[in-house]
Amino acid sequence: MKVTLLKSSFIAMLAAWLAMWATPTYADNPVTVYKALDQPQTTNQLPIAFDIIFNANPNLPVLPQHIVISGTAKVESFVVTGNARWWKLIITKVISPGTIKPIIPANVIGDNRISAISPDDIVTYKVNPTPKPTKKYHPGHYVLVNPLDDLEIATRSLNIMGVQKRYYWRTLEPALDQYDFSSIRADLEYAREHNLQLIPFIIDKTFRVNQPTPLPDYVINDYNGEFHYIDSANNIDIRMAKRWKLNVEGRYLALIRALGAAFDADPNIEGINLQETAAEGVEVDLTSEYDPIAYHANLIERINVAGQAFPTTRVHLMINGFPRATAGDPYRTVVFVRTMATAIMRVDGVYSGPDILPFSTDLNSPFGVYPVYADLANLMITGCSAQLDSFNHKYPKDYPNTAGLYITDPFKDGASMAGEWLPMQRIFDFGVDTLKLEYFIWREVDPTKDPTQVDTHFKFVPDALSVIINPANAARFPGLILHQNYLPLITK
């Protein structure tokens, strides 16, 4: 009950925050600075976040030199990230305690704008006398393994930094409060024997036809907790937890706490991976009971609870978008995604994602998640995975023209590549150079498979392996070395 009340209060705060966006408090001041929705008014944790909201699109970016940090605290560094009307100010270093009050003076962004801030939005920073626990950190190449496969798939041919293994929620909790972590323990023992790090990937969402539900039966039957959405044209069959419902999310958080108690202290547990934030179909299917305000609040709570449950282990959150807070208004998504990023930073987690797709319009758009990597990669640990779509990604048909893709061509490969498959070298280049990845997760790359006899997505597996062992690439991103006896398989 205590958790429910706390989260209900947080949801009410978020609803009020959204209302302030819709009806600005200060009619005479077209810019308002708000304390971020999840930012305590008094804190000893960094970063400290504020939201900058314009009444109308200023048509010019907000830059750090536009901001004046007043108050009694001494702020040494901060960044500004966002788009159009919605911006986030993230304070990353404070060298003396006190109050923090950011303002935008008049005439600094091309017109006569001046910011307003209420006393309730001034943050007081106190020095934290208790240092944070040191978290495990073994960056490099990891291989993603499916729930029904064993780790031997990833290790029989590769000497890798670690494995990210998927586990269905229903496998880990077959009945209410009855946990079965034997599958993780068996994989952990194997990882330890082979000097590997293990990142358990908790699945509460599946995508494809004929995939089983990832949810325990009691969540489906007793909590009405499964959202089921079918898009036959795209071969999509979504089964996912209704993460926006308090009772469903409460059960998920209980699982995370139990996992933390069981595995945080193990040195070979590198991280705990929370599944992607996208929720296809929830806005068009009324049976979803979708509530964007509750969903965003619950995602922030998910990060915070996982950070508390795993004090020495990094929380990986796969952020790949957010169903819009208001239909037709993507700018609020800009702030929502960045709020999740700052929550990840506070728990020393990993800002991650499920797809490395250099020419994705959605991911590269000003309202997507790739700009967050560009803005904040130097302030947080980053990860991302090359999954099936990365092995099946193409240059635009009118390449090298990338107009409309929100991206400047990062490769300069020439018009002859228009419409062609993207080489895995380019997936690697984009991950390392543009996204600044520290954890590079590869879909199963098994060189013993005949690429002509398996799913077409795997035709580039030999290409991926050759990229990984390339000495020039290893110098840029160490962590994965192919055993020498498998070289002939990828150099045919």
Image (tube, rainbow, N blue to C red):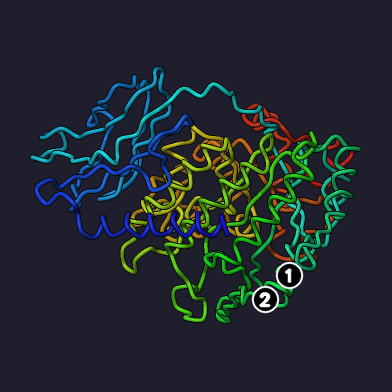
Q: Is residue 99 left or right of residue 469?
A: left
Q: Position of residue 242 (x, y in %)?
A: 57, 69
Q: Residue at x 68, y 37 (%)?
A: 313
Q: Position of residue 266 (x, y in %)?
A: 80, 37
Task: Farthest residue to the front: give it.
Answer: 1
Q: Residue at x 85, y 55 (%)?
A: 183
For the residues bearing labels 2 and 1, Cβ distance under 8 angstroms = yes
Above or below, 472 against 430 in this view is: above
- For the residues labelled 2 and 1, the Cα–Cα distance comes to 7 Å
Could you tell me if residue 411 is visible in this image?
no
- Mark 1: amino acid: Pro
| Disc 2 element | helix
Q: Residue at x 42, y 24 (%)?
A: 93
319 or 269, which lies in front?
Answer: 269
- Mark 2: amino acid: Ile
Residue behind mark 2: 220
